Image (cartoon, rainbow, N blue to C red):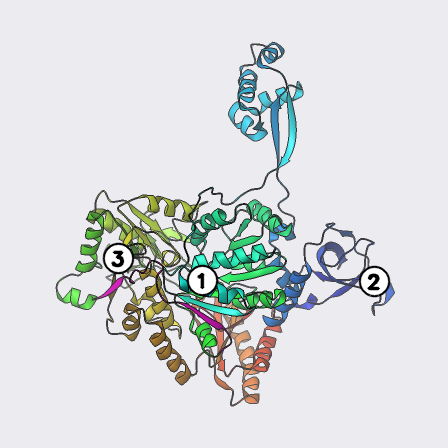
Amino acid sequence: MFAQVVVDISNDAVDRIFDYIALPDTQVGMRVKVPFANRSVLGYVIGLKDKTTVDNSKLKSIISNLESVPKLKPEILSLCDFLAGHFFLRLSDAIKLVLPSCVRLDSQKEQNFFVLSPIYDIDTAINMIGNRAKSQLSAYAFLCEQGECEFSKLVELFGRSAINALVEKGMVSKIAERRMRAPISSNEKIARNILTKSQQSAIDTISAHDETFLLQGVTGSGKTEVYMNIIEKALSENKTAIMLVPEISLTPQMMNRFNSRFPNLVAVLHSGLSEGERYDEWDRIFTGQAKVVLGARSAIFAPLENLGAIIIDEEHDGSYVSETNPRFFTHDVAEFRARYNKCPLVLGSATPSIDSFNKAKNGTYHLVELPERINGLEMPKIEIVDMLTEVMDGNTSPYSKKLIAKLDQAIKNKKQSILFINRRGFASFMVCRECGYRAKCDDCEVSLVYHKEDNQLKCHFCGKRYRALTNCPNCNSQNIKYGALGTERVCEDLKEMFPGVPIFRMDNDTTRGKNGHKNILEQFSKTTPSILVGTQMIAKGHDYPNVAFVGILDADVSLYNSDYKSNERTFQLVTQVAGRAGRKTNDGYVVLQTYAPKHYVYRFATAYDYRSFYDKEINLRQTTGFPPYSTILRILVSSESDNRAKDVTKKLYDKAIEIKAKYKREIIFLQAMPSPVKRIQTKYRYQILTRYVPNDKITSEFFELSDIIEKDVSIFVEINPNNLR
């Protein structure tokens, strides 16, 4: 028997299947050790066959099978083939996507806890131990009181030598137990909501068909309850389910709801888990102990079998597109798994992506709508404040009079408020007023952001830190100007304006620690009145009944990005963050600060008129030839040598010109240029951008350009990139 093996090496030269002599118990899907180029490497068995075309003198045998039960199940192997073909990935890289590194490399084993329990009564123990060994006596008395205790906890309380002495004397029984490292635990009981007619209709429609559904429901319309009912039906049929959310910050609140509805059946997967937690959660899923997987983008690869439903909440969110290698689009992966399992795929959002709604309009997706909030409440009123008028009236502050008045009103009414600004730090840059020197990162071609709490300048691209400026290093002037305000500055200002009012901040800086998101949100939810200041991680999914006011400090941040999706993203952000207000009462109010009050995006957003916005935007896309009426492809070239990056870009561009010559009518645009951020993490970056009528052959030919192997140069190809930085 011969095994077809993919070796765990990310290199185009070895991106193929190798034949090895199989061991007697080798199975498809196993991880194996194989000899390769005078060393032993990790490999994956993707097939077995009786014959081989390889010369017997060149055949080598598998060294060892690394498991008795294959880690790669049949569906996951099929998924790897799909990933490799659809996203033009190496098969070994596709396998790395579906197998977490802790599982693939066995970097985390099962965790055994030693549990001790007393054998003798306390009087007998005192005689055996003696009066001098105080720590042993205390530990034994503690054990007699508790009945049993983990070895590690006893060591922490009484010292290792005392506990080891009790074990050596045979005074305690020692039992090894497997304990799972649970990332989130909750025993909270959440009442079941009574379904509205719209919710019940949505559930009935989705449960009856194995299709892709776009569930469009206004914020507060009860989409989560629809999701849970669909999953409940899948479980009743002995099936499983995947539920994806875009932000780690949404997971704790969602986990509480799901644990309450499906106790002991939910596993969670996201990038915030420790390696040990990820290993244990993956193992619970793999062995069938967990039937429902909740998590961010990577949870789509969960090794569940017999899927009955896949749900992608906030489907419009950009985090569902992987911007690091290996690149993939979560929706495409979900569609493959839904087809494989013949189950419904639900894409939910109050503000669907233009692409998804277009597919719903042309019949590719089935549109289901929840047009009203579940409690019959009106959507919160959004008032636009023209900041130019504020300046003309003498208010040069970044906070309008209306915003301050509404904050004050919410505080007096013992309500909560949310302020949204999509910039973290204290100031977006530091610049010398005398000579114009601007503090920039040595390794990246970007301005450094000032963080006052640390009194440091930080690069938000590579993480490098520098001392804050007190004097200009160029002209020695102390006349230093700060850039646009961020979350840290907003919190400082609020503490001065509203002394004594609890201010919470939620951004990448405050949520780095273990359970960072969970702790902040729990504190905020229990504190009234209070104000939560945050970036886009607070803009969606959160449900807090006491939030009466939402302030959008600088809505224009995303509006004027040089990106064809800027209008779409701005509409989505405004609508989503506004939807956090007035979810349980009719006192919701939103203030939107802008320097472009008459922009059509704001006109439609304040009316919550998604249909009119879509009609306007899709007409604009069609007129200008942007997606979904075209495909945008980007080839990104990077190297620590500027000349090398330029040379390779030129070489690729010459080949791209040849492709354009073959498809003159289909290719609308082709241009090579420096990337908008020319240097990141010491690497110079150039790009080739092309836009063409959707055509798989053209896509394939452009992807083939990335197969060129150039020393010290990285080449990545992206389809419809989310970010062109």
Q: Mark 3, residues whose alpha carbon is within 10 Å: few (<14), some, or many (≥20)?
A: some
Q: Is residue 127 above or below residue 195?
A: above
Looking at the rendered structure, the kind of residue marked 1 is Gln
Which range is magenta?
363-384
The residue identified by callout 2 is: 59
| Discs 3/2, front | 3
Residue 221 placement, left or right of 603: right
Q: Earlier in the sequence, mark 3 or mark 1?
A: 1
Disc 1 to disc 2, C-alpha distance: 61 Å
Task: Examine the image and state in which quarter residue 36 appears.
Answer: bottom right
Task: Examine the image and state in which quarter residue 486 appears.
Answer: bottom left
The residue identified by callout 3 is: 586
SS of the residue under disc 1:
helix
Q: Earlier in the sequence, mark 1 or mark 2?
A: 2
Say whether residue 88 is magenta. Answer: no
Q: Is residue 502 above or below residue 642?
A: above
Residue 112 placement, left or right of 632: right
The residue identified by callout 1 is: 200
Pointer 3 and pointer 2: residues touching (CB < 8 Å)?
A: no
Disc 3 to disc 1, C-alpha distance: 24 Å
